Image (spheres, helix red, strand yellow):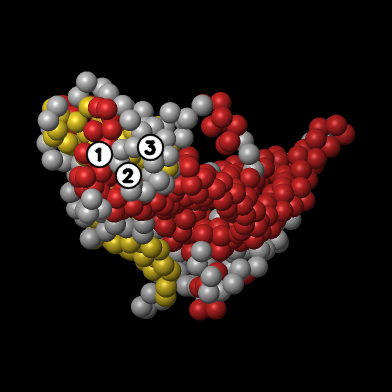
Amino acid sequence: MKRLVRRFRTLPIRARLSMLVAAAVAFAVAAVSVTCWFIVQGKLYDQADNDLKKVVQQPRLEDQVESLLNACNQDTQNGARGFPGNSYFQVVKADGTVCVSPYSVGKVKVSAADKQVIENSDDKAVFHNGTAENGDPVRVLTLPLTTTEGSAALVIGTSLKGTQSTLNELALILLLVSGIGVIGAGAAGLAVARAGLRPVDKLTEAVEHVARTEDLSVRIPVEDDSEDEIARLSRSFNSMTSSLANSRELQQQLIADAGHELRTPLTSLRTNIELLTRSEETGRPLPEADRKALLASVKAQMTELAALIGDLQELSRSEGQRGERVQVVSLEDTVESALRRARLRGPELTITASIDPWYTRAEPAALERAVVNILDNAVKFSPEGGVIDVRLSGGVLTVRDHGPGIPTEELPHVFDRFWRSPSARALPGSGLGLSIVARTVEQAGGQVTLAHADGGGTVATVRLPGAPTPPPEDPATAL
């Protein structure tokens, strides 16, 4: 059985659907056919029973039975005169003697039902099936009799040959109709399966085309008002290919932008190293001041490359890798740690801070990097001796600088990858800092915005969900 089930599961969907439809129709047709056959059989037997009851209702039945008994006792052949000759008519005595009317069409074999009627000696008539001596089926009515010799039974029967012939013909007709119905149902099921699975064939062809050519522009046409499972599957496939195409486009754009951003520091680094190498090879060393400036430039370019590579690694990390490190983070501690680093990078600036406790769910290292990037951005654009105001209250972190601010037309692009303001391209940076901030905050369920500050400068606002106190045990349910 298990082998058949495994074999069935390996068949194509069309074949399985056709077989299931045919099996369901076969079961239904078989149930209807069997029910119909038994109903017809019951009706025919009822008709035979009614015919036997009419015989019993003859006005001279008792005289005929008495005449038959007398003839049986006298061993003569002239008893039961006037009994119709198209039925079985006999009396069975308690000792097993059978008196058959000379006008009976034959003798019926004595059955257990006949003997039980004699033994019980009640007034209940019994209908049952019997067999004649020649083997023909007979429908029998057995009636109890009381004679001077003791208990006996009157057995009246009618042939069931016509009834059996009718039932056999009906069974054959039902079998043929059932077979035709099952074959038709299988063919209809196959046609329905082909029509219903035609969209699946298109989807399969599209998937195979994508796998073969990596062409993500393939779309499966779907009717707008269709809401069946195939339409939903087609829409899901179209949505998936659109997402993959967008992901590929973003990936290609990231690679192109990264290559462009890497080219400048690498070219400058290569030029500086070639100058140092040439001076050593020619035996004409550079002046000490020029040499120190060149080495400082090389060090700065190496630092810029390392920062750019770190940013690219951060952007390339998958959601699964980030999700494994998410935990409850004290935003207060994260901001204070970032402030210490910011003060080292801008010692000439005044950084004021007002920080209240707040706990949120995020990746600790990524969240600290995002806060550091916001503070670095404020340090970079603040004038010498300027002030940076940092405030954390109710899960809202604001960082306000007093620099030149961001032009209104550039605000929509500040969180784009590798985007840098034309006025800031001379400053160090890769254009990935704010992009990393936006993605980190969004992954933590928050929002980040940049806007003009009253009185000049820029204010960065970060809103993160959470609570002012840490959860007792389960951070996933508390925050």
Whether residues under marks 1 and 2 lie with C-beta atoms below 8 angstroms apart, the answer is: yes
- Residue at 65% in and 68% down: 221
Residue hosting label 3:
102
Q: Name which residue lies at 70% across and 61% down.
A: 218
Residue sitting nearer the eye, 78 or 63:
78
Mark 1 Cα shell of 10 Å, populated few (<14), some (14-19), many (≥20)? some
The kind of residue tagged 1 is Ser
Q: Residues within 10 Å of mark 2 (few under 14, many from 20)?
A: some
Name which residue type carries label 2. Answer: Arg
The mark found on residue 29 in the picture is none
Q: Tell me the SS state at disc 1.
A: helix
> Where does label 1 land, which residue?
67
Q: Please provide percent x and percent y for residue 144.
A: 18, 36
Q: Nearer the viewer, residue 29 or 34?
A: 34
Distance from Cα at disc 2 to Cα at disc 3: 8 Å
Counting from the top left corner in percent of width and height, residue 421 is at: 59, 68
Which residue is depicted at the point 27% across and 36% down? 68
Marks 1/3 in contact by CB < 8 Å: the verdict is no
On screen, residue 339 versus residue 201, left or right, reads left
2 or 3: tag closer to the N-terminus = 2
Residue 238 quadrant: bottom right
Residue 117, compared with residue 251, is above or below; it is above
What's the CA distance linking mark 1 and mark 2?
A: 8 Å
Pointer 2 residue: 81
Report x, y in % for residue 20: 54, 46
User: Is 206 displayed left or right of 233 in the figure?
Assistant: right
- Element type where label 2 sits in the image: loop
Amino acid, disc 3: Pro
Q: Evaluate if marks 2 and 3 touch, with contact meaning CB atoms under 8 Å apart.
A: no
Q: Nearer the viewer, residue 193 or 32?
A: 32
Residue 94 versus residue 452 in the image, above or below: above
